[in-house]
Amino acid sequence: MTTITRADMFERELQKLYHAELEILDLHADLADAAASDEVRALFADHEADTVEQIHRIERIFEELGMESRVAGSPVMEGILAEKDEIVSTDAPPALRDLDVLSTGMLNERFEITVLDRLLLLATDLEISEEISTELGANRQEAKAALTEMEAIVERRRLE
Ligand SMILES: [Fe+2]
């Protein structure tokens, strides 16, 4: 068993987040293709610019900390990607198809938020510069906004 420090954990989680964001570019494109409605398709297609900016923020953090920007896959992200593969190859009526697509998107945003919360907590404990917490906070805010947008569609359709 290896012992890790807070700094090691911060680096590991940042690599995990970096991997997730790079995968999300394809994930969102696949979810946009799989969506049944224009509304859901547009939601995933429109988030590409946000994801690219989130990737840049992570790269700036690696650089600021003098760390190599490396990716580390995680079983959770692999699971989300496997769920996506399953739903895109399943035939479902339009409403269910959109629900599948939105649920996978929400799962992914919640994962991002969870990793970001841990990074923000560790950043505070490690007394890492305010600038880095601001970058992490910006990614968290965008993930939360995307999650809220997806939840709102699911909720509105449930009531229709
Ligand atoms: Fe993201």
Image: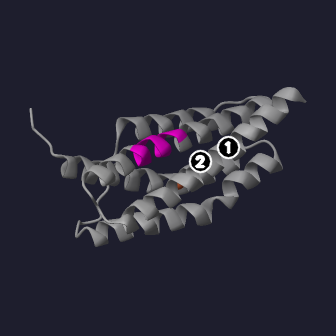
**Residue 100 seen by the camera:** yes
Q: Nearer the viewer, residue 71 or 9?
A: 9
Identify the disc placed on residue 144: 2
Q: Residue furthest right?
A: 160
Q: Nearer the viewer, residue 2 or 116?
A: 116
Residues marked 2 and 1 touching at CB (< 8 Å): yes
Residue 130 in percent (x, y) is at: 37, 65
**In this picture, is 48 found above or below 100?**
below
Residue at image position (65%, 30%) is 90
Q: How is the image coloured?
A: one colour
Q: Which residues are magenta?
A: 110-117
Residue at image position (60%, 51%) is 28
Q: Main secondary structure of the magenta part?
A: helix
Q: CA distance from mark 2 to mark 1?
A: 6 Å
Residue 49 in percent (x, y) is at: 60, 66
User: Disc 1 designates what residue?
Assistant: 148
Instruction: Report whether the residue tagged 2 is closer than 8 Å to ligand 1.
Output: no
Position of residue 88 in the picture relative to residue 126 (left or right): right
- As for residue 154 lying within the magenta part, the answer is no
The three-letter amino acid code for the residue at tag 2 is Lys
**Residue 30 seen by the camera:** no
Q: Secondary structure at mark 2?
A: helix
The C terminus sits in image quarter: top right
Q: Nearer the viewer, residue 48 or 3?
A: 3
Q: Residues within 10 Å of mark 1 (few under 14, many from 20)?
A: some
**In this picture, is 64 found above or below 109?**
below
Position of residue 11 in the picture relative to residue 118 (left or right): left
The three-letter amino acid code for the residue at tag 1 is Thr
- As for residue 116 lying within the magenta part, the answer is yes
Residue at image position (39%, 68%) is 131
